[in-house]
Amino acid sequence: NAGVTQTPKFRILKIGQSMTLQCTQDMNHNYMYWYRQDPGMGLKLIYYSVGAGITDKGEVPNGYNVSRSTTEDFPLRLELAAPSQTSVYFCASSYYGGRANQETQYFGPGTRLLVL
Amino acid sequence: DQQVKQNSPSLSVQEGRISILNCDYTNSMFDYFLWYKKYPAEGPTFLISISSIKDKNEDGRFTVFLNKSAKHLSLHIVPSQPGDSAVYFCAASVWNNAGNMLTFGGGTRLMVKP
């Protein structure tokens, strides 16, 4: 049971390049999330998904896209990288079975992205 | 507009003493509060939580206190150990149809000196 895995661990992008950050969980969780953490700041929600085929915007979605074709995978796409997207990105998952039956979020180790 | 604030970016404590980490929030609709711990180059891990219907929750060396009238919660670690050195994030949520969306504070770096 690996939990939540993220690849790559670190990446340098040039302005305007695109890339996909991968996230996989093996806990059969229905909910998945993408956060970014800027230095000295808390985690901000980019996108989330409540199940395969269903995604929605979080607090800071601009410049990103997501898809959820399977329960396990929730990739985050950056189409035109900008220096403002330099950050550490965390993927998380949780089981949600209604208000009385929910688990906390489990986080992956993060992807450090530098856009130059 | 930060709805969850941790006003102390860092805290240094001697091993064996009590560590008190504080968190303030502004949204009175928050009904669930959590603390996460984060080591360098790792993702945050869940530490302890408290529902808004309680004012205290204890788990071993960790206790979270909630003061709803003051919109304030705190995490007490007793006794503090060097392995507790990490960044601690306070988070809050309000239930809606989309589930349990978390709002995080900026974190407090705790250093426990041997």
Image (cartoon, helix red, strand yellow):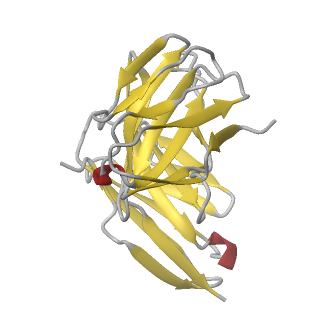
> x and y percent of residue A27 in the render?
72, 27
**Residue reaching furthest to the right:** A1
On the question of residue A38 being in view, the answer is yes
Question: Relative to residue B68, is residue A109 drawn left or right?
Answer: right
> x and y percent of residue A14 in the render?
39, 52
Residue occupying image coordinates x 63% and y 17%: A71
Depth order, front residue of A29/A12: A12
Question: Relative to residue B65, is residue B40 drawn left or right?
Answer: right
Q: How many marks?
A: 0
> x and y percent of residue A82 in the render?
30, 48
Depth order, front residue of A43/A6: A6
> x and y percent of residue A23 in the render?
60, 34
On the question of residue A104 being in view, the answer is no
Q: Quadrant of residue B62?
A: bottom right
Q: Quadrant of the C terminus of chain B?
A: bottom right
Query: Is B36 placed above or below B109 here?
Result: above
Query: Is B9 placed above or below A100 here?
Result: below
Depth order, front residue of B112/A1: A1
